[in-house]
Image (spheres, helix red, strand yellow):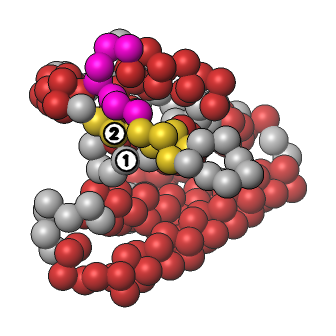
């Protein structure tokens, strides 16, 4: 099975979902499309790793809800305990920043402004998400078996990464303006 198949099984371990819901959720972790996900769901159903429930809808096609089977849970458990590959990163912004020496001051400033704005937007978004989770149920966030716990800890992670990224941008801007590379010895934290 490929990583996307395991990703779908892992999401179904949190709650039953439609193919549409699975596509939306998996895209929080890596990019995929309906055209990649629906054939995999059929394969997972053939392998009896997921079960399908049809929900009748008036004026629309029946809704297909996918559930993880006992065999699917067992397969997923084996994946959970297997070694995890390094994340695949493709980051155009980082590549541009790597070449900052080739930019004029205006281009570098524009790039840093753009990156800082993205980090600020992420920080605001994730702070809002955490607040919503806390309002939903602060008690369940303290319970590792809660369906909200995984979302909470991952939201905290990306919030902290965005805060650190913003600090890093300020540090880059400072040393870029100074053109004094002795400042590189100073930790940006």
- Residue 79 spot, x, y in % from top left: 21, 24
Q: Is residue 68 above or below residue 134?
A: above
Residue drawn at x 35%, y 60% as measured from the top left: 151
The image quadrant of residue 109 is bottom right
Q: Magenta stretch containing residue 48, yes or no?
A: yes
Report if the CB atoms under discs 1 and 2 are less than 8 Å apart. Answer: yes
* Residue wearing tag 1: 16
Give the image location of residue 181, x and y in percent: 54, 50
Q: Nearer the viewer, residue 96 or 138?
A: 138
In the rendered image, which quarter is residue 139 located in?
A: bottom left
- Magenta stretch: give its range: 46-52
Query: Of label 1 and label 2, which has the lower sequence position?
Result: 1
Find disc 2 in the rendering and name its residue: 67
In the rendered picture of this protein, how many numbered marks are placed on residues? 2
Residue 11 vertical position relative to residue 95 in the rendered view, above or below: below
Residue that protrudes farthest toward the bottom in the picture: 135
Q: Is residue 95 visible?
A: yes
Q: Position of residue 30 (x, y in %)?
A: 52, 36
Q: Residue at x 29, y 65 (%)?
A: 148
Q: What secondary structure is found at the residue carrying circle 1?
A: loop
Observer-nearest of 130 and 51: 51
């Amino acid at each position: 099975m490929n990583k996307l198949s395991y990703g779908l099984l892992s999401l179904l371990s949190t709650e039953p979902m439609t193919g549409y819901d699975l596509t939306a959720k998996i895209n929080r972790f890596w990019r995929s499309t309906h055209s990649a996900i629906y054939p995999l769901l059929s394969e997972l159903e053939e392998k009896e790793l997921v079960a399908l429930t049809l929900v009748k809808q008036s004026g629309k096609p029946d809704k297909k809800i996918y559930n993880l089977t006992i065999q699917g849970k067992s397969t997923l458990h084996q994946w959970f305990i297997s070694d995890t590959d390094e994340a695949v990163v493709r980051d155009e912004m980082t590549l541009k920043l790597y070449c900052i020496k080739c930019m004029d001051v205006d281009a570098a400033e524009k790039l840093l402004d753009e990156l800082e704005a993205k980090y600020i937007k992420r920080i605001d978004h994730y702070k809002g998400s955490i607040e919503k989770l806390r309002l939903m149920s602060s008690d369940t966030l303290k319970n590792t078996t809660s369906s909200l716990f995984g979302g909470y800890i991952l939201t905290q992670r990306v919030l902290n990464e965005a805060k650190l990224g913003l600090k890093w941008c300020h540090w880059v801007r400072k040393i870029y303006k100074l053109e004094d590379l002795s400042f590189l010895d100073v930790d940006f934290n």
